[in-house]
Image (spheres, grey):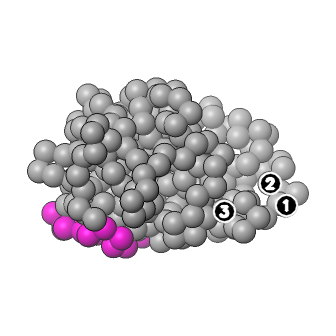
Amino acid sequence: MAARLTGDLVPLALPFRGSCRVQNSPANRVPSHGTDAFGSAFAIDLVPVDERGRSAPRTWRGLVAPEPPEIFVGFGRPIQAPVTGVVAHVHDGEPDHAGRRSQVALLPYLWGQRGRAALGAPGLAGNHVVLAIGPGGPFVLLAHLQHGSVRVQPGEEVVLGAPVARCGNSGNSTEPHLHLQVSDTMDWPRARGLPFVFVRGDVSWLPRTSELVRG
């Protein structure tokens, strides 16, 4: 499926195989992440889960402390290009953080939020790939990728469904997941978020927060 605009919506395919839980969906509110900054007004988060809807097995450690990212279902799950396009930008070099599922473990992480924001795209998006749908955009951002997993290079054309990277926990992320957004420019301080839908066959939809979807 070549990318095209359907009205004002950019059609995308789901970038995962397997089940995901939706978080921070623009179907529930806009801006979906509570801010318009960095073109994120219509961003969505996809958290891979197991057949029981869990992102990781429940353990005593998860109640009080950070957890290794490797225990999470999504860590290392392949990410596929949600659209045909050209790789406009790649960043891979940020570490994968421990996962934090409890409020106790989350508090110290929140204290570092300002520092991560000060680093710009690497601090917030972590390892990421940007696909340009056309010469002047729109631009699809795939963020929080696993360190060392990016398989594409700037200027490379990728087709829908091609392997791009693996899901990680880099940047501003508390558990392995994929942050996906569409923006009108890669000048991130000026970027405006663009709405999109997922397309499968003749069906297009935008899942809501907490909904389970399967790619």
Residue underneath mark 1: 59
From the viewer's perspective, is 185 left or right of 42?
A: left
Q: 72 above or below 124?
A: below
Residue underneath mark 3: 49
**First in sequence: mark 1 vs mark 3:** 3
Tag nearer the camera, 1 or 3: 3
Q: CA distance from mark 1 to mark 3?
A: 16 Å
Q: Residue at x 47, y 71 (%)?
A: 78
User: Residue 62: which numbered mark, if any?
Assistant: 2
The extreme front residue here reads 202
Q: Position of residue 17 (x, y in %)?
A: 52, 70
What amino acid does circle 3 point to?
Answer: Val
From the viewer's perspective, is 9 left or right of 88?
A: right
Q: Nearer the viewer, residue 189 or 82?
A: 82
User: Residue 142: which numbered mark, if any?
Assistant: none
**Is 158 part of what is drawn in magenta?**
yes
Dot 3: what SS?
Answer: loop
What amino acid does circle 2 point to?
Answer: Gly
Within 10 Å of the Cα at label 2, are there few (<14), some (14-19), or many (20+) other Cα atoms?
some
Q: 104 above or below 192?
A: below
Q: Residue at x 77, y 39 (%)?
A: 103
**First in sequence: mark 2 vs mark 3:** 3
The answer to whether residue 96 is seen in the rendering is no
Q: CA distance from mark 1 to mark 2?
A: 5 Å
Dot 1: what SS?
Answer: loop
Q: CA distance from mark 2 to mark 3?
A: 16 Å
Magenta segment, which residues? 146-163
